[in-house]
Image (cartoon, rainbow, N blue to C red):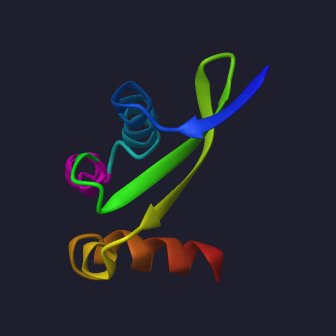
Amino acid sequence: MFIYRRATLKDLNNIWDKDIEQNKDDKRYIKWKEEFILANKEEKIVTFVVLKDEDPIGQISVAFDPLCLKVKCRDMCVMVKKQLT
């Protein structure tokens, strides 16, 4: 069964723990986890998650503070852009 909702703190930790596991050699993921969870707590970013049997399989984050993504997460934005091209 699929569920779509605003991510809980548990969801965010699960999402980032999976990302860190899949990118073991890239230590930036540990920093990004802290930044994104803090930004969600401060409501500068709101993350929504798709769960299948309580396992996060998809997500999207909406940034309400443009500086949050432009400054704090610049490395991640560049990395994602490179992966898409």
Name the residue located 33 percent from the left edge and 81 percent from the top edge.
66
Is the residue 51 above or below the residue 22 in the image? above
Q: Looking at this view, name the residue that lies furthest to the right.
A: 1
Residue 58, horizontal then vertical, whole percent = 63, 44
Asked if residue 45 is among those painted magenta in the image, a careful observer would answer: no
Q: Name which quarter of the figure residue 52 lies in.
A: top right
Asked if residue 31 is among those painted magenta in the image, a careful observer would answer: yes
Is the residue 64 above or below the residue 43 in the image? below
Magenta region's main secondary structure? helix
In this image, 36 relative to 4: left or right?
left
Magenta-tinted stretch: 26-40
Q: Which quarter of the figure is the C terminus placed in? A: bottom right
Name the residue located 41 percent from the left edge and 80 percent from the top edge.
78
In this image, 41 relative to 9: left or right?
left
Is the residue 50 above or below the residue 77 in the image? above
Please tell me how many numbered marks the rendered image carries.
Answer: 0
Residue 44, horizontal then vertical, whole percent = 29, 63
Residue 23, horizontal then vertical, whole percent = 41, 46
Q: In this view of the protein, which residue sits in the foreground, 42 or 76?
A: 42
Name the residue located 25 percent from the left edge and 57 percent from the top edge.
28
Q: Which quarter of the figure is the N terminus placed in? A: top right
Name the residue located 57 percent from the left edge and 41 percent from the top edge.
49
Residue 46, horizontal then vertical, whole percent = 42, 54
